[in-house]
Image (cartoon, rainbow, N blue to C red):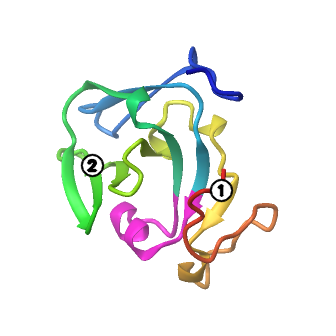
Amino acid sequence: MNMPGHDDTAAHEGGCLCGAVRYRVVGEPLALTRCHCRSCRLASGAPSLAWAIFRAEDFVLVTGRPTRFASSPGVERTFCAICGTSLTYRSADRPDAIDVTTATLDDASRFAPTKEIWTEHALAWQPLDAALPHSPRSSRGAA
């Protein structure tokens, strides 16, 4: 199904720091977020984490197998067991979507966040982008 704004021919590749895990995703993201929740901060070791959210059916591993971790009930994160790079996030309440850590895309500059989420958890010294919409918690359902 070709949806407006969804380019089925666009392929994007990415992977971890050491190159052991590589992936490909086809199509354009459903959403682009920057998350400030504590779980994302701990998983990434960073003050916030940018996500490009794609249709799960459009994501495929090209090489390697990431390690899976159930970070909370109904949530699975993946990372490279060799270098530790955080790669994906899947939620049982959104089985048709996969969140890919934006920085792991080969051309990450094409995927700037369009909104910030879980801002109520943002670190006091981490400024929010005044040009973006903010959600104190999740913004599920919003594009």
Q: Secondary structure at mark 2?
A: strand
Location of mark 1 (residue): 142
Q: Label 1's element? A: loop
Position of the N terminus, as image quadrant, is: top right
Which residues fall within the magenta stretch? 34-49
Residue type at mark 1? Ala
Q: Is residue 61 above or below residue 88?
A: above
Q: Is residue 33 left or right of residue 45?
A: right
- Front position in the image: 108 or 94: 94
- Of discs 1 and 2, which sits in the foreground? 1
Q: Is residue 16 left or right of residue 48?
A: left
The residue pinned by badge 2 equals 79
Q: Which mark is residue 49?
A: none
Residue under the image location 45 percent in, 65 percent down: 46
User: Where residue 47 appears, x then y in whole percent?
Assistant: 50, 70
> Residue 73 appears at what percent x and percent y?
26, 68
Q: Nearer the viewer, residue 134 or 18?
A: 134
Pick whichever of labels 1 and 2 is earlier in the sequence: 2
| Identity, as a three-letter code, of the amino acid under mark 2 | Phe
Q: Nearer the viewer, residue 50 or 85?
A: 50
Assess whether mark 2 and mark 1 are in contact (beta carbons under 8 angstroms). Answer: no
Q: How many marks?
A: 2
| Picture quadrant of residue 30 | top right
Check the image and report above or below for 61 versus 78: above
Residue 134: x percent and y percent? 70, 69
Q: CA distance from mark 1 to mark 2?
A: 27 Å
Residue at the spot x=32%, y=56% of the render? 92
Mark 2 neighbour density, 10 Å: few (under 14) some (14–19) many (20 or more): many
Q: Assess whether residue 48 is covered by the magenta stretch.
A: yes
